[in-house]
Image: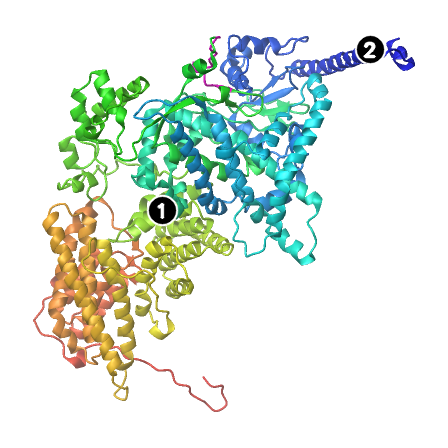
């Protein structure tokens, strides 16, 4: 009757009342119909034997959820539901031996039918499956579902492919200098709000600051615009974006559906959409119309490269529909950044604040990677942004944080074709009509999945050994999702979080400040806690921190004195003066000194005292207990040893002699322990690749440099292998080739290893073709030289070396990385080609951009940097002089310019020797007993190289071989040095097997020079013996076996000594005579002639 009355008319009030009643009736009817459909769906499943929690046909699972959440805060995040169900599964599923792989939950009308995926394997499988996105209407007010998160099928693939290069690790690293400015502003706000002299500052919410930071970073990274949200915000863009996000809501119930058509809401959506378009349209147009060679690294520039050229060619304005799609992508990036990245920053800082021991390890890692002065962090990162990828422990902290505080669970829609098998019953569990929620929090506290689950253990992300109890279960961690739709912005998010931690960790103490927060709001109501903490995850979408995580900050680092003031005050307050002496002698942290701390006049905040006590007790435990590891000297002194090899830095820095380390008994370590490493947690690699990378870091990298400094291989190569794909695959190739170097050809794994090496070499070449970064090209070029040396490919190694030097010479401006690391490496490589058939006129001379160090030398590195280019110049001159030395009598004699050049080289060698002797004398006087084994080896190698260079330059213009007899004293000195080296290495070789291959030229070629050019039988035999004991199987391209074979031939021809094997060298007796000129083997220069034969082509 009401409907009829509505149609015939009435007063406005009556019509409004009837319409309202009609709406209520419709809502009730709709709810009842949906209620019946949902309840019958679950009831049918229960009748079919599907594992189900206690179910009410009237109320569904609402009574069960109410029971397990009784007494908990009403606003806890949905993530907690799966955790609470999993923790009580034995009572909820009586009779089962295991928890079901998925748990069906009916909370209608408060939510749709849903399934929580519980088992990690099932959750990983669901995330990787091709299932539709659930509730795409959630972001429709923001993006009209044009965003990459809402798109499906071919259209999603197109946009994903466009943005993949923009979010690649390489491009993200290029954005780091700009991001540094925003994070520095972020740290500046902390500095402004921090209390002075160890006192806590005013309380504020961390989420607001982190949100502003992520907005600034995304604005700069995506469009190259500076939003200044942290300093001048909120901007119009942020106001419109945040209000539009507030209009996004999951439509579970009829109330949600009615709210979605609210006219006021629709007006706000339209207003915000217009405001966002006004703010984003022009920057996008500028990006698309910007001309140039792609120097801009913003996300839009990188993603739109293919389309920009097309727009320019047609001279047409870009399509409006396309512009809307680009804006949709930017808005979803901003939404994800403010919603997830900011939240991860908050929880990571929370974890560090609650675990001082972990914070200390993070600080120590940052000291090691960035340097011990935090004020230099910006300068260091601007110069070497790749260092952010060298923080494995920090990355482990972030992943552990996301394990304990998962931000947002992936949500998929079930499908009739997708079913999940119950391993206990064998039943196929349906997913159709259900929302599939990733119950990621359900197993985050499960002992079987995560050993010691309640503890924060970053070390679990550093192990690659599957037998390690801490090794993560496959599929258990899904912080950024998984499968094809894994979060595209994970690299940018990781970079931003790491940088935020880097700028805050060493300068501030941060802690939650709930009491101060309550006082500031005059709040006296009940204090809700979850798992014993007021700071818990709440919200309906992203699992954010309760009330934005109120915190206060104390300046933990005095920038001028580098003193943690509250430590000394805490010692006094706790009445532990007897620990003061221990604190002063231990000095475990780089900038903690008790004397300076006691100079402070301010009192520390009492909240610091528990941490001070924990710190001091930890120090007392380490200082008073038996030292189980470290060098012999540090064990005797009962102090912490840094375990640097061959001599620990603690002994060397204090002027003590390091007595080395006690070798463990044979068989102490398993292969898994020997190959255990700490790769960055973001390393995406197969098990075979992880093993090869581990083998490279633990076995190959430390030995490739031979006796020289191995920083290039142990640090740079391993760092770049995680940053550049071409470098990664080249490193994998080197690792594989080294492992199978000269191994048994009948080994059943030889073919498999060779295939692994070849496939990775091809991948390295493929990835190298896609980069135009000169640093990457040059670095991988060096790795390719190493690959060819391992393979014994002389021509390939020379060509790669030639190519690298040509690139260096063509470069107008060289970065510090190139000048400091790549130029010296290519300079040293400039020697070996001239011993394998290369002529100076066919091989480029390297133009050194960085001048060689001048005397006096302050370090061994300076002495080496001065000698290397001098030796290259020497060998080039020697090979140029071969034209005369190896020619016939008709060859022209060297002119005055040649002789002048020779004199200059000779004088330069003498000057270097004088400076080097001065350096050695000063070092011997200062540290007579503290010189490391590596330093001694470098000194010996440099002296041997210098002697060989002197003999080269003195004999290169003589056609006779007897001239070398004038240098027997120099040959004798080479043998003496080699014998000293043999004694030094003998004990080392007893503890560690000798390396099979070294990239750098070591002692073998220098001893080989003695074998070839010294005709004294005594010295020649001594050189051959030493080649066997101190050289490696291959050094650069010089083969140990080839040198020994050559030596036996020379002994036979020139000294009339016949050897069947090298062991007979011990029986050789020298009669003191030198072979005459006619008996000596002499090189000859061969010239090709063109010969014509009748009836044949010219040869």
Question: Which residue bears the numbered disc 2?
Answer: 13
Residue 706 in the figure: left or right of residue 811: left
Q: Earlier in the sequence, mark 2 or mark 1?
A: 2
Give the overall secondary structure of the magenta segment. loop
Residue 65 in the figure: left or right of residue 251: left
Residue 17 in the figure: left or right of residue 639: right
- Is residue 377 magenta-colored? no
Task: Name above or below for residue 574 compared with residue 295.
Answer: above
Residue 639 in the figure: left or right of residue 485: left
Front-most of 701 and 426?
A: 701
Q: Position of residue 352 (x, y in %)?
A: 38, 27
Residue range corresponding to the magenta coloring:
525-537
Front-most of 709 and 88?
A: 709
Quarter of the rendering occupied by the N terminus: top right
Kindly report the distance in space between the C-alpha atoms of the residues bearing marks 2 and 1.
Answer: 82 Å
Point out the residue furthest to the bottom here: 1094
Q: Which mark is residue 278?
A: none
Report the mark closest to the observer, 2 or 1.
2
Point out the residue furthest to the left here: 1071
Question: Which residue bears the numbered disc 1?
Answer: 696
Q: Residue at x 31, y 52 (%)?
A: 704
């Amino acid at each position: 009757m009401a409907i009829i009355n509505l149609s015939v008319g009435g007063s406005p009030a009556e019509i409004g009342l009837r319409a309202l009643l009609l709406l209520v009736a419709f809502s009730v009817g709709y709810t009842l119909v949906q209620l019946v459909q949902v309840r019958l769906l679950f009831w049918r499943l229960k009748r079919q034997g599907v594992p189900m929690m206690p179910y009410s046909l009237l109320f569904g699972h609402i009574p069960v959820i109410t029971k397990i959440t009784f007494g908990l805060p009403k606003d806890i995040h949905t993530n907690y539901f799966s955790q609470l169900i999993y923790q009580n599964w034995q009572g909820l599923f009586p009779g089962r031996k295991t928890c079901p792989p998925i748990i069906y939950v009916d909370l209608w009308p408060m939510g749709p039918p849903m399934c929580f995926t519980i088992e990690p394997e099932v959750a990983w499988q669901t995330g990787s499956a091709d299932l539709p996105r659930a509730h795409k209407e959630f972001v429709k007010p923001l993006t009209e579902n044009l965003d990459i998160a809402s798109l499906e099928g071919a259209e999603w693939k197109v946009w994903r492919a466009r943005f993949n290069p923009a979010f690649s690790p390489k491009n993200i690293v290029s954005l780091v200098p700009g991001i540094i400015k925003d994070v520095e502003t972020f740290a500046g706000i902390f500095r402004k709000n921090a209390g002075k002299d160890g006192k806590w500052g005013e309380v504020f919410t961390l989420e607001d600051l982190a949100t502003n930071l992520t907005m600034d970073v995304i604005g700069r990274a995506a469009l190259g615009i500076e939003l200044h949200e942290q300093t001048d915000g909120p901007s119009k863009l942020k106001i419109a974006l945040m209000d539009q996000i507030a209009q996004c809501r999951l439509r579970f119930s009829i109330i949600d559906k009615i709210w979605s058509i609210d006219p006021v809401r629709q007006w706000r959506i339209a207003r915000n959409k217009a405001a966002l378009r006004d703010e984003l349209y022009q920057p996008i147009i500028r990006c698309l119309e910007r001309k140039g060679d792609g120097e801009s690294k913003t996300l839009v520039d990188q993603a739109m490269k293919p389309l920009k050229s097309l727009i320019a060619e047609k001279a047409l304005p870009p399509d409006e529909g396309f512009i809307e799609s680009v804006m949709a992508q930017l808005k979803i990036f901003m939404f994800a950044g403010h919603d997830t990245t900011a939240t991860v920053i908050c929880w990571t800082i929370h974890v560090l604040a609650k675990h001082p021991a972990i914070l200390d390890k993070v600080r120590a890692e940052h000291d090691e990677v960035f340097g011990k002065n935090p004020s230099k962090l910006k300068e260091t990162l601007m110069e070497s942004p790749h260092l952010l990828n060298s923080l494995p422990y920090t990355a482990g902290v972030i992943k552990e944080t996301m394990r304990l505080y998962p931000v947002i669970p992936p949500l998929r829609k079930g499908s009739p074709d997708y079913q999940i098998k119950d391993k206990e019953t064998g039943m196929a569990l349906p997913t159709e009509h259900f929302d599939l929620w990733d119950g990621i929090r359900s197993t985050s506290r499960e002992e079987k999945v995560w050993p010691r689950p309640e503890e924060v253990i970053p070390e679990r992300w550093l192990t690659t050994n599957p037998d390690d109890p801490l090794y993560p279960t496959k599929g258990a961690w899904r912080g950024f999702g998984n499968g094809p739709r894994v979060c595209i912005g994970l690299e940018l998010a990781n970079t931003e979080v790491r940088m935020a931690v880097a700028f805050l960790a060493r300068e501030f103490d941060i802690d939650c400040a709930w009491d101060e927060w309550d006082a500031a709001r005059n709040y006296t109501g009940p204090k809700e806690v979850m798992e014993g903490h007021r700071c818990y995850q709440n919200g309906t979408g992203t699992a954010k921190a309760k009330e934005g995580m109120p915190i206060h900050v104390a300046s933990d680092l005095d920038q001028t004195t580098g003193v943690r003031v509250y430590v000394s005050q805490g010692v006094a307050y706790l009445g532990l003066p007897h620990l003061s002496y221990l604190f002063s002698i231990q000095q475990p942290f780089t900038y903690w000194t008790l004397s300076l701390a006691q100079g402070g006049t301010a009192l520390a905040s009492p909240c610091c005292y528990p941490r001070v006590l924990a710190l001091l007790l930890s120090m007392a435990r380490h200082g008073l207990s038996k030292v189980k590891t470290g060098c012999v000297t540090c064990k005797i002194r009962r102090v912490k040893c840094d375990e640097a090899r061959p001599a620990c830095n603690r002994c060397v820095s204090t002027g003590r002699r390091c007595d080395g380390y006690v070798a463990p008994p044979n068989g102490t370590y398993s292969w898994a322990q020997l190959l255990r490493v700490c790769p960055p947690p973001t390393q995406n690699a197969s098990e075979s690749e992880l093993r090869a990378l581990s083998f490279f870091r633990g076995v190959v990298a430390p030995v490739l440099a031979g006796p020289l400094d191995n920083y290039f291989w142990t640090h740079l190569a391993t760092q770049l292998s995680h940053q550049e794909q071409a470098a990664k695959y080249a490193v994998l190739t080197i690792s594989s080739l080294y492992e199978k170097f000269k191994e048994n050809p009948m080994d059943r794994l030889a073919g498999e290893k060779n295939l692994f090496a070849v496939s990775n070499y091809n991948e390295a070449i493929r990835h190298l073709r896609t980069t135009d970064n000169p640093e990457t090209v040059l670095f991988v070029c060096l790795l390719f030289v190493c690959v060819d040396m391992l393979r014994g490919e002389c021509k390939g190694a020379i060509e790669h070396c030639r190519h690298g030097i040509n690139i260096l010479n063509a470069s107008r401006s060289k970065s510090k990385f190139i000048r400091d690391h790549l130029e010296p490496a290519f300079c040293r490589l400039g020697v070996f080609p001239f011993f394998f058939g290369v002529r100076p006129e066919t091989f480029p001379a390297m133009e050194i951009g960085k001048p060689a160090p001048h005397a006096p030398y302050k370090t061994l590195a300076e002495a080496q940097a001065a000698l290397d280019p001098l030796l290259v110049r020497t060998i080039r001159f020697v090979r140029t002089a071969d034209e005369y030395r190896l020619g016939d009598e008709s060859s022209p004699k060297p002119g005055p310019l040649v002789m002048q050049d020779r004199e200059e080289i000779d004088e330069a060698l003498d000057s270097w020797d004088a400076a080097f002797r001065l350096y050695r004398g000063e070092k011997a006087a200062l540290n007579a007993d503290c010189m490391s084994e590596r330093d001694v080896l470098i000194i010996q190698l440099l002296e041997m190289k210098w002697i060989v260079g002197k003999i080269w330059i003195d004999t290169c213009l003589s056609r006779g071989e007897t001239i070398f007899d004038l240098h027997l004293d120099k040959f004798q000195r080479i043998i003496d040095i080699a014998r000293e080296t043999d004694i030094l290495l003998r004990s080392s070789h007893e503890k560690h097997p000798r390396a099979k291959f070294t990239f750098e030229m070591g002692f073998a070629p220098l001893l080989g020079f003695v074998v070839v050019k010294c005709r004294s039988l005594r010295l020649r035999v001594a050189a051959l013996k030493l080649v066997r004991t101190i050289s490696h199987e291959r050094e650069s391209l010089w083969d140990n076996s080839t040198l020994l074979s050559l030596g036996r031939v020379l002994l036979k021809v020139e000294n009339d000594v016949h050897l069947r094997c090298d062991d007979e060298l011990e029986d050789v007796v020298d009669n003191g005579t030198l072979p005459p000129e006619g008996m000596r083997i002499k090189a000859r220069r061969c010239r090709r002639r063109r010969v014509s034969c009748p009836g044949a082509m010219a040869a």
